[in-house]
Amino acid sequence: MLDFHEKKHILVVEDDPNVANLIRVVLSKKEMQVSIASNGLEALSFLKSQYSDIIISDIMMPKMDGYALREALLKEEDLRTIPFIFLSAKDQTKDIVKGMEYDVETYIPKPFDPEILVAKVSAILRKYDRINKLLLYDTLTNVFNRRTLEFRLSNELKRVSRYHQSLSIIMADLDHFKKINDKYGHDFGDVVLKSVASLFKEELRDTDFVGRVGGEEFVLVLPNTDKEAGLFVANRMRSRVEAYTFKYSQVTFSGGVATAPEDGVEMKTLLKKADQAMYRAKENGRNQIVSF
């Protein structure tokens, strides 16, 4: 799930390359990132590793048609809520009614007007941005709130078990944050939290995500990342925060890294182990990273 201020990703599922490229061109002009799958099976494979903000799908396709794709997505807890559009040459009233029964945002018959397509996609993105901002994000730092972070992490861990992948999490806690608040005030403390969250996001890949899970505590989730790579990323972030110039005070954090499947594949277990490692970093002098 991308931040609502970031470039949006659209997955187009279409077996006609001319139609797919037309959609890519018109949406790219609106600064949207577009990927193309030629059938439902390719789309499902793509979504294993890349989140999309909207899926635009044809209905009549080889191997897996649009109806079957939509049915498969509705069974996946972490994919069912992605806004879905049918774009199809099946333009009779009965076809449109049937398509809408699959709980989609809209149904656009072919041939379509590119301006109308862009307008509908933009409207859907704006609507979900408003919903996401209210329900999914921490209002101060603009990263995931605890509930969203745990939901996304739980689903990523299912992928670890299902596809024999690795995943690392970083538990990051700002050092001496209470002293910063007490000495310089909560307004400066809020600036620190927002700035650190932004620094974290700048260092993450599109598939990674971060959430604020406590007052000054963050969890960063790195799919397809083993322990060694997780430690490397954590130390890179630690150095980035330490080097950042704040108005009143230097800011550092202590971090703990835990990795699935070697440290466990249950969310609570992994978070607990990352937390234990983080506390060891605190006990060892702070401003360092420790792995479980």
Image: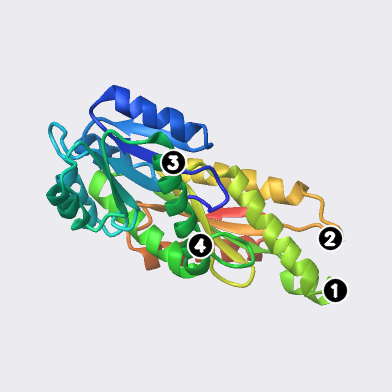
Give the image quarter of residue 215. Answer: bottom right
- What's the CA distance linking mark 2 and mark 3? 46 Å
In the image, farthest residue toward the bottom = 182
Tag 2–tag 3 contact (CB < 8 Å): no
Q: Please state the horizontal and vertical placement of residue 167, each as a whole percent of the image.
A: 40, 49
Camera-side residue: 205 or 83?
A: 83
Dot label at residue 118: 3
Q: Earlier in the sequence, mark 4 or mark 2?
A: 4
Camera-side residue: 147 or 157?
A: 147
Q: Which residue is mark 2?
A: 249
Q: Nearer the viewer, mark 1 or mark 4?
A: 4
Amino acid type indicated by mark 4: Arg
Q: Which element type, helix, strand or loop, lies under badge 4?
A: helix
Q: Which residue is mark 4?
A: 130
Q: For the point 53% across and 52% down, which residue is it?
A: 3
- What's the CA distance linking mark 1 and mark 3? 50 Å
- Decide: is 85 above or below 196: above
Q: Nearer the viewer, mark 3 or mark 4?
A: 3
Q: For the point 75% across and 63% down, which residue is it?
A: 191
Q: Please state the horizontal and vertical placement of residue 239, each as a whole percent of the image.
A: 69, 46
Dot label at residue 183: 1
Tag 3–tag 4 contact (CB < 8 Å): no
Q: Which element type, helix, strand or loop, lies under badge 1?
A: helix
Q: For the point 16% across and 49% down, which residue is it?
A: 93
Q: Please state the horizontal and vertical placement of residue 150, each as a whole percent of the image.
A: 42, 65
Q: Residues within 10 Å of mark 2 (few under 14, many from 20)?
A: few
Residue 292 in view here: no
Amino acid type indicated by mark 2: Ser
